[in-house]
Image (spheres, grey):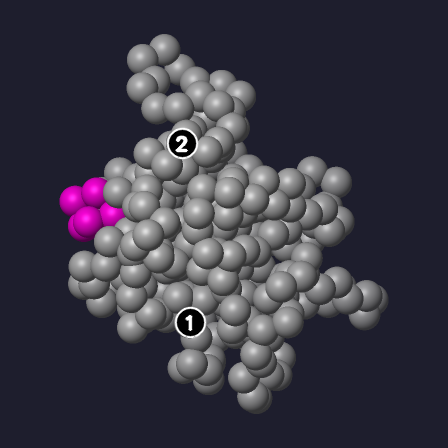
C-alpha cells in the first residue's frame, strides 16, 4: 500500500534510520493490480512492529530520484521484508514495482517507521481491524504477527473491497478463521452470483454485527482511503467506542 503517511510520520522514529539496499528475492501477484515483493535487507533493524511502514527510494540512471512510503506486509517474525504495492495507472513508482522489477533487482529502503499505528500481542485485545481496499496491508502484518506468535487474542477483520477479485491475500484470509481470526467481507461494486457476504459500504449495522461490544474496549485499527477512514472512525465513535481506542491510518493519491 502506498500512502501519504500522514500519521505514520508523526510516530516515533527509531534510530538509526538510514537508507539500506534491499534485494528482491521473490515476487507474488496478489490481484490484477497488486504485487507483493519480498526483499532481503541486510542489517534490517530488529525493532519492527506490525503496522509500520518504510520509505522506498528509486534512482534513475540520470540521477533522478523518487520516494514513496509503503506499509510493511510481513510480520516482524518473518524472514524477508514484504511490501504489497498496488499499481496506480498514472503513477511514477508503482508501475515499476508492480510490472518491471525482477528477482535480483535492488532499491533503497529506510525504516521501519511509525509508532502509533502498530500492534503487538502484548497490547492484547479484543482486536478489531477494518480495512478499505489495500488498507488491508498493515492490518495483515498484525494478523500474521498474531499467527506467528500463536496468540489467542479475539481478532476480527472487516474488509471492504470493490469486488472479490480485488481482495488481497485470499488464501491466507480463507484459512484465518481456522486460526481464530473472524473475517467479514463487503463488496461495494461487483459481486458474483452466490455471494453471501455484504454488498454495501461499511455502516453502523455492519460494525455492530462484527463487534465486539464497545464496553469490552477493543483496540480498533482502521486503514484505507481518507473518506473511508474518516467515515468508519466516526461510526465507531457514534457506536460508543472510545476515540482513544480507535487508531487510524489513511492514504490518498501520491503520484504512484
Residue range in magenta is 177-181
Residue 64 rendering spot, x and y as whole percentages: 81, 66
Q: Count of labels shown?
A: 2
Q: Secondary structure at mark 1?
A: loop
62 vs 97, nearest the viewer: 97
Could you say where residue 85 lies in the image, as x and y percent from the top left?
A: 55, 50
- Choose between 62 and 165: the one closer to the eye: 165
Residue 236 vertical placement versus 16 (above, below): above
Residue of label 2: 206
Residue at left 35%, top 44%?
A: 157
| Mark 2 in CB contact with mark 1 (< 8 angstroms) | no
Classify residue 58 by image quadrant. bottom right
Circle 1 crowding by C-alpha within 10 Å: few under 14, some 14–19, many from 20: many
Residue 133 location, x and y as percent?
Answer: 51, 40
Above/below status of 195 relative to 215: above
User: Tag 2, which secondary structure?
Assistant: helix
Magenta stretch containing residue 95, yes or no? no
Distance between the Cα atoms at labels 2 and 1?
29 Å
Q: Earlier in the sequence, mark 2 or mark 1?
A: 1
Residue bearing mark 1: 49
Point out the frontmost of discs 2 and 1: 2
Kindly give the residue lying farthest to the bottom in the view shown.
16
Q: Residue at horizontal 51%, vertical 28%?
A: 201
Amino acid at each position: 500500500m502506498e500512502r501519504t503517511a500522514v500519521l505514520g510520520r508523526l510516530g516515533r522514529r527509531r534510530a538509526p534510520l538510514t537508507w539500506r539496499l534491499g534485494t528482491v528475492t521473490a515476487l507474488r501477484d496478489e490481484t490484477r493490480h497488486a504485487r507483493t515483493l519480498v526483499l532481503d535487507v541486510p542489517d534490517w533493524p530488529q525493532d519492527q512492529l506490525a503496522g509500520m511502514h518504510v520509505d522506498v527510494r528509486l534512482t534513475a540512471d540520470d540521477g533522478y530520484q523518487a520516494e514513496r512510503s509503503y506499509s510493511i506486509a510481513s510480520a516482524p517474525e518473518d524472514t524477508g521484508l514484504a511490501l504489497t504495492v498496488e499499481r496506480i495507472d498514472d503513477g511514477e513508482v508503482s508501475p515499476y514495482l508492480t510490472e518491471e522489477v525482477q528477482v535480483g533487482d535492488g532499491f533503497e529502503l529506510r525504516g521501519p517507521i511509525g509508532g502509533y499505528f502498530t500492534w503487538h500481542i502484548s497490547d492484547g485485545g479484543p482486536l478489531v481491524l477494518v480495512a478499505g481496499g489495500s488498507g488491508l496491508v498493515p492490518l495483515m502484518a498484525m494478523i500474521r504477527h498474531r499467527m506467528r506468535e500463536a496468540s489467542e487474542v479475539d481478532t476480527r477483520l472487516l474488509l471492504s473491497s470493490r469486488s472479490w477479485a480485488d481482495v488481497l491475500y485470499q488464501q491466507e484470509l480463507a484459512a484465518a478463521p481456522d486460526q481464530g481470526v473472524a473475517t467479514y467481507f463487503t463488496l461495494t461494486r461487483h459481486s458474483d452470483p452466490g455471494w453471501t457476504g455484504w454488498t454495501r459500504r461499511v455502516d453502523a449495522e455492519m460494525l455492530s454485527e462484527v463487534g465486539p461490544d464497545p464496553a469490552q474496549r477493543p483496540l480498533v485499527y482502521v486503514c484505507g482511503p481518507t473518506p473511508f477512514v474518516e467515515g468508519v472512525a466516526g461510526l465507531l465513535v457514534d457506536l460508543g467506542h472510545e476515540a482513544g481506542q480507535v487508531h487510524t491510518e489513511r492514504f490518498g493519491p501520491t503520484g504512484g
